[in-house]
Image (cartoon, helix red, strand yellow):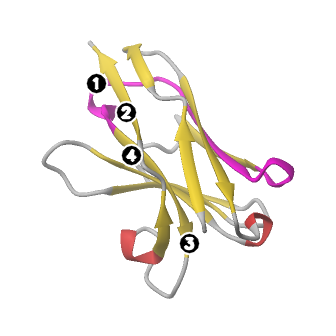
Amino acid sequence: QVQLVESGGGLVQTGGSLRLSCAASAFNFSRNTMGWFRQAPGKEREFLASILWSGTTFYSDSVKGRFTISRDNAKSTVYLQMNGLQPEDTAVYYCARRHGRAHYTTPAGYDYWGQGTQVTVSS
């Protein structure tokens, strides 16, 4: 069955960097749009970035210029490079596969999700 497995989270100081990875399996990864979201305690799941099969990218205003989404179709993996991390970036980060007609910035626009990876930014 479809699987998405995130890795790369951890504890980092303010201003630091992390690179998250999401390994996909059991579907034609190279033909699918992929996205990254995050969810902080008590908050809704928030769209961060998405990348089309062609490599075209989209970002939320909150991370534009600090985060970079990329993909390696040969490895069926999507990445999120995060620079300039701030305490407000602390959350569980999820990758997801785009599906359906709901807007790409909403969780309803994705059908499969990873288990999430915790990112904690200390002040």
Point out which mark residue 87 bears.
1
Three-letter code for the amino acid on which mark 1 is drawn: Pro
Which residue was labeled with disc 4?
A: 62
Q: Secondary structure at mark 2?
A: strand
Which residue was labeled with disc 3?
A: 98
Q: Quadrant of residue 53?
A: bottom right
Instruction: Nearest to the eye among marks 1 and 4: give it.
Output: 1
Q: Secondary structure at mark 1?
A: helix
Image coords of residue 100 (percent x, y): 52, 85
Q: Are marks 1 and 2 in contact (CB under 8 Å)?
A: no
Image coords of residue 86 (percent x, y): 34, 24
Q: Which of the marked residues, 2 or 3, is nearer the chain's N terminus? A: 3
Residue at left 47%, top 15%? 16
Which image quarter is the C terminus in?
top left
Three-letter code for the amino acid on which mark 4 is drawn: Ser
Q: Which of the marked residues, 4 or 3, is nearer the chain's N terminus? A: 4
Point out which mark residue 118 bears.
2
Tell me the magenta residue range: 72-91
